Image (cartoon, rainbow, N blue to C red):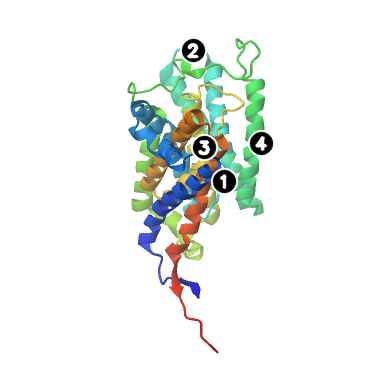
């Protein structure tokens, strides 16, 4: 008889090995999925995971990993603080959208002023504050009324999407756009554009912010008393109270921090790769960042690596769609499969398989 036996202490080997196992398992199961769709599974897996790095067009695809990965890392770092503390912000997608709207609103309000030294930093601040304000709503409701922040933050995503559509069709619509939905193109407004810092590198201010955030999170979690309080709150809430941690304050800080980073990610995206507020501006980065956070074990360095891997699936998935005719839903399913496989393999971090002989009565 096969049983799961709880380990005396979680296995560190499995803790860091399970993401690798989850990725390999996803490749195998994804291959079976693509075979069922009538595709050569080896060709599809190679196209998604290897072609962006080693094909003849890799010089073009590699910078895209930085562009796609930066918002994922920014959002996931913010989420990791909350997840470690037991605060479940599932609505980063809404905070990402509101941050983009607030940041773009500053640029459009000051158009066509020529003062990049003032406009772009103000946009970043406005984006972060917008995301922070949207995240604080479920935080305050949990602290004041005991509501579930998972449900509230998730529902606010749909409110943010409606707000995005209203802005694209109304207040932020380009007056010179001949009636088409969408704002002015911010990438063509020098004072507001999130320009590439090094030509051909993919490095823009969003990438720089992501790298700085990784360093900040690593130092905070490993060297600062706040990081200790975050870990203690998540692992032993009662002990955290005895250590002087205010649970309500921790909820608000973690929700606000994750919202601010998601909002900043939205701003860097709307001022750079996306270029404008449009109905389809949001592409699911806020939800994908949840996978990135857990795939990276809620550790800043792990999140950076997981963000690069997930960016690879976006780029490779796009190549597979155009060259192999795969549906976009199949790529989304592959990403979701990665999270479920991680959760499944994670069981072995806490439990081990034991074979027991069935006693004959």
Mark 1 and mark 3 lie on one chain; the one further toward the N terminus is 1
**Residue identified by numbered label 1:** 90
Image position, residue 54 (x, y; %): 33, 33
> Which x, y percent locates residue 198?
32, 23
Determine the residue positioned at 49% across, 72% down.
2
Can you tell which mark lies on residue 113? 2
Q: CA–CA distance between discs 4 and 2?
A: 31 Å
Which percent across, then down, holds residue 319? 46, 31
User: Which residue lies under the disc numbered 4?
Assistant: 159
Residue 15, relative to residue 355: is it above or below?
above
The residue carrying pointer 2 sits among few (fewer than 14), some (14 to 19) or many (20 or more) residues within 10 Å by Cα, namely some
Query: Could you tell which of marks 3 and 4 lies nearer the N-terminus?
Result: 4
Label 2 residue SS? loop
For the residues carrying marks 1 and 2, which lies nearer the camera in this image? 1
Which residue is tagged 3? 285
Q: In the figure, 44 relative to 197: above or below?
A: below
């Amino acid at each position: 008889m096969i049983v799961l036996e709880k380990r005396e202490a979680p296995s560190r080997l499995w803790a860091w090995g399970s993401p690798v196992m989850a990725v390999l398992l996803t490749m195998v199961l994804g291959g079976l999925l693509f075979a069922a769709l009538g595709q050569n599974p080896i060709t599809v897996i190679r196209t998604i995971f290897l072609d962006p790095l080693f094909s003849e067009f890799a010089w073009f695809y590699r910078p895209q990993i930085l562009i796609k990965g930066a918002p994922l890392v920014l959002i996931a770092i913010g989420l990791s603080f909350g997840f470690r503390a037991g605060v479940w912000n599932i609505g980063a997608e809404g905070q990402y959208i509101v941050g983009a709207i607030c940041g773009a609103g500053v640029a459009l309000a000051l158009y066509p002023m020529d003062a990049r030294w003032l406009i772009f930093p103000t946009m970043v601040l406005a984006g972060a504050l917008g995301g922070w304000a949207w995240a604080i709503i479920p935080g305050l409701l949990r602290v004041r009324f005991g509501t579930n922040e998972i449900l509230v933050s998730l529902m606010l995503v749909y409110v943010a999407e409606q707000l995005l559509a209203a802005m694209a069709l109304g207040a932020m619509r380009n007056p010179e756009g001949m009636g088409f939905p969408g704002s002015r193109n911010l990438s063509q407004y020098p004072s507001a554009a999130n320009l590439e810092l090094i030509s051909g590198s993919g490095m823009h201010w969003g990438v720089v912010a992501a790298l700085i955030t990784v360093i900040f999170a690593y130092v905070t979690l490993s060297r600062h008393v706040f990081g200790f309080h975050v870990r203690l709150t998540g692992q032993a809430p009662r002990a955290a109270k005895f250590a002087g941690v205010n649970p309500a304050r921790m909820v608000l800080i973690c929700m606000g921090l994750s919202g601010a980073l998601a909002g900043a990610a939205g701003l860097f995206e709307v001022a750079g790769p996306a270029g404008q507020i449009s109905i389809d501006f949001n592409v699911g980065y806020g939800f994908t960042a949840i996978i990135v956070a857990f795939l990276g074990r809620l550790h800043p360095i792990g999140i950076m690596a997981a963000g690069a891997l997930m960016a690879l699936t976006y780029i490779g998935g796009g190549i597979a769609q155009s060259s192999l005719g795969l549906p976009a839903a199949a790529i989304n399913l592959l990403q979701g499969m990665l999270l479920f496989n991680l959760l499944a393999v994670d069981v072995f971090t806490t439990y081990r398989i034991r074979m027991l002989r069935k006693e004959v009565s």
